[in-house]
Amino acid sequence: MGKIDNLKLENLDQLFPETFTKEQVAKGKTLFLKELSDSMHRFYGGKMQTIPKAGLYGFNWFNVWYTPGVSKVSTTIRDNPDASFELSNRGNLVAVVSDSTRVLGDGDCGPSGGLGVMEGKAFLMKYLGGVDAIALCIDSRDENGKHDPKKIIEFVKMLAPSVGAVNLEDISQPNCFEVLDTLRDACDIPVWHDDAQGTGCVTLAGLINALKVVGKKIGDVKIAMLGAGASNTTIASLIIQAGGDPKKMVMCDSKGGLHTGRADIEADTAFYKKWDLCKATNPGKITTIEEAMDGADVLIALSKPGPDTVKKEWVATMAEKAIVFVCSNPVPEIYPYAAKEAGAYIVATGRGDFPNQVNNSLCFPGLLKGALLVKARKITDKMAIAAAYAIAETAEKNGLTPDYISPLMSETDTFRNVARAVALQAQKDGVARVAMTADEVYAQASIDIDEARGLVQHLIDEKFIKEPTVEMLEEALEKAIAQLG
């Protein structure tokens, strides 16, 4: 077993005994990251805090920031509500809202169960996009214990005057569809469903580049899709809008292929987006994912955690230079090494400890930053597609390979590029309150991102953020290895 000698968490594979199989190492990394996450959340008491952004230079400054001076701010906003974007932090503030009914791969975790994830989104928004965010997990159950989407809708409509945008997260289907579609029309600020639109954006970006690597065109490829939740239905929609041929796409849910013979989907109006895909895709009425993958150029799986959800023998039947996206968290539907052994040419997951991380974190910090900078009223599909192309182009400039189709999280220019592309598209789509040039957006996004990173580093350097010990990391590793037996 390797020894952890610093806090950077590099080369995780080397931390495990040489006698471990590839599967044991893959499982071990997952267990280690879970154990370490639990330990660090206890150590810090969560990930986020609130600190002032204004200075205090003497006692009377309390009277400037609060009463009586702040009365001028109140009456100005009263007379012009849009002034709230300039006179408060609203213009750079996102509410991350969830009812915690579909938390990553863990399902319904209770109203407070999603706080770790929502704080995580807030952490990434601040560090990667220079955007402030607050985690708001709510109880959407009615008096009978049933989750009511209208409760989420009403909650968001009520809080909208205090924030510049809303990031919906981890809301189970079909409620997530009604919540997003209703709020996109009802609110005068962007309402973004990251599980759906964010995943769609980064997957499209990865697909654009993967197709360049294998020399295929988006309109020509046969695409199999496993899972028909908010993520994959939105991915399908964005791929079609970007030039994919719906007649060459087959999507499968837990009951089989989506097609016009699926009376169960047609009868349930809550699944209207799935029914739209039933009508648009799979004209041959393929019924199983095995059949859909036979000869397919691309597999996009966002279903249930693996590692055996997708079988090696299914991958082996795919076309030459097959592209496999297995993005279930925390464990992909098939481990990358197994997919490669079965013949896949490019494999992407949602995890940063494997090559080709197709993760929403590449999208939402920059996308929301761009939308906030022009004070957008909503986020259109064209804005999401513009973000996808910005992500893809950022990686392409560095040189694409089978193991590099998306930028790394450390490539900070991604978020500036996405902010610029989204802000410009918002203006083209007529949803921006203010006009900014490409250079102005890029420059302001850069300032805000650099300040956020500098603040975090200053807090670390000055010991306001406590530093964990290497021993804490090693303890988590020992617990993980013990669970493997």
Image (cartoon, helix red, strand yellow):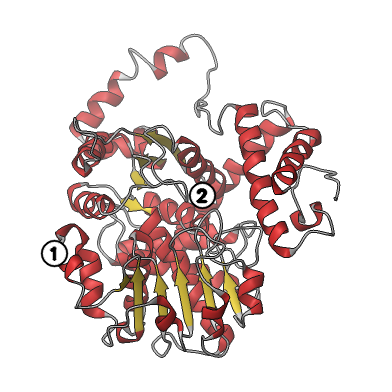
Residue named by callout 2: 129
Q: Quadrant of residue 414?
A: bottom right
Q: Residue at x 45, y 72 (%)?
A: 300
Residue 58 is left or right of residue 66, and the answer is right
Residue 9 is left or right of residue 159, and the answer is right
Marked residue nearer the N-terminal end (1 or 2): 2
- Residue 389 visible in the snapshot: no
- Residue 200 visible in the snapshot: yes
Give the amino acid at mark 2. Answer: Gly
Q: What is the x, y in percent for residue 75?
A: 23, 25
92 and 158: which is toward the camera: 158
Q: Residue furthest top?
A: 59
280 and 303: which is toward the camera: 303
Q: Give the foreground label among 1 and 2.
A: 1
Residue named by callout 1: 267
CA gap between label 1 and label 2 equals 42 Å
Give the amino acid at mark 1. Answer: Ala
- Answer few, some or many: residues within 10 Å of disc 2's Cα (few below 14, many 20 plus, some between 14 and 19): many
Q: Residue at x 70, y 33 (%)?
A: 460
- Answer few, some or many: residues within 10 Å of disc 1's Cα (few below 14, many 20 plus, some between 14 and 19): few
Q: Residue at x 55, y 49 (%)?
A: 128
Q: What is the x, y in percent for residue 399?
A: 65, 77
Q: Residue at x 26, y 86 (%)?
A: 283
